[in-house]
Image: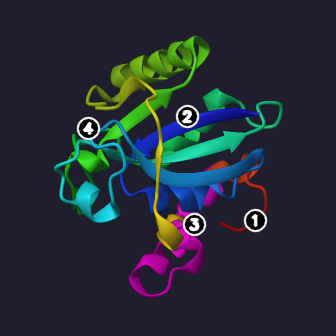
Amino acid sequence: KEVATLAGGCFWCLEAVFDGLQGVESVESGYMGGQRPDPTYEAVCSGDTGHAEVVRVTFNPKVLSYRDLLEVFFVIHDPTTLNRQGNDVGSQYRSAIFYHSPTQKSEADKIVSEMKKAIRLACTAPTDAPRLCPMEGSAGRYMSMAKGPMAEIRPSTRAVRKKLRFILASGQL
């Protein structure tokens, strides 16, 4: 097993995609990189804690490589906007790769460098992974319970599914 921690906007949006990948054993939403030891969702949303919304992905590297996981990450979020993903604005929505080992750091640095050459505006920052602050309560599995506007994320992943069909656990996200 290996763990990857990624920040790319709303953690529920990331969770919805990573949950459907072959080799992914679990996805946990939480916060990382801030000043408060145990922030609440409301505190993080205020932008005052310094945390990023993240997903911690536990995966089997024999099935899904760390590099492949990072490539999926760059397909499902916009690495070109600083502290913003779509309508979500604030440092809690920044793009970051929180690495857990020297090997992950090397791979993260390499792919970010490639992205910067390709699009010149990549804002993604590889950063050493501090302690994860797990999402509190049932909100941590929000996408599996979503109804209303947030439930629309699942259908909007059709384009992602087409690009990533080779590593999806099933035909559905």
**Residue in the picture at 30% in, 49% down:** 93
Q: Mark 2 belongs to which amino acid?
A: Leu
Q: Which mark is residue 105?
A: none
Q: Position of residue 131 (x, y in %)?
A: 46, 35
Q: Which mark is residue 171?
A: 1
Q: Residue furthest front?
A: 37
Distance, label 3 to label 2, CA atoms, is: 19 Å
Could you tell me which quadrant the C terminus lies in? bottom right
Check if mark 1's residue and mark 4's residue have beta carbons within 8 Å: no
Side of 51 relative to 55 (left or right): left
Distance, label 2 to label 1, CA atoms, is: 20 Å
Image vertical order of residue 1 relative to residue 108, above or below: below
Q: Which residue is mark 3?
A: 158
The mark closer to the camera, 4 or 2, is: 4
Q: Mark 4 belongs to which amino acid?
A: Gln
Residue interval drawn in magenta: 141-163
* Residue 125 picture quarter: top left
Q: Which residue is mark 4?
A: 35
**Residue in the picture at 46% in, 52% down:** 30
Q: Mark 1 belongs to which amino acid?
A: Gly
How crowded pointer 1 is (Cα within 10 Å; few <14, some 14-19, many 20+) is rated as: few
Side of 43 relative to 76 (left or right): left
Could you tell me which quadrant the N terminus lies in? top right
Side of 46 relative to 149 (left or right): left
Distance, label 1 to label 3, CA atoms, is: 10 Å
Q: Which residue is mark 2?
A: 70
**Residue in the picture at 34% in, 36% down:** 33
Q: Secondary structure at mark 4?
A: loop
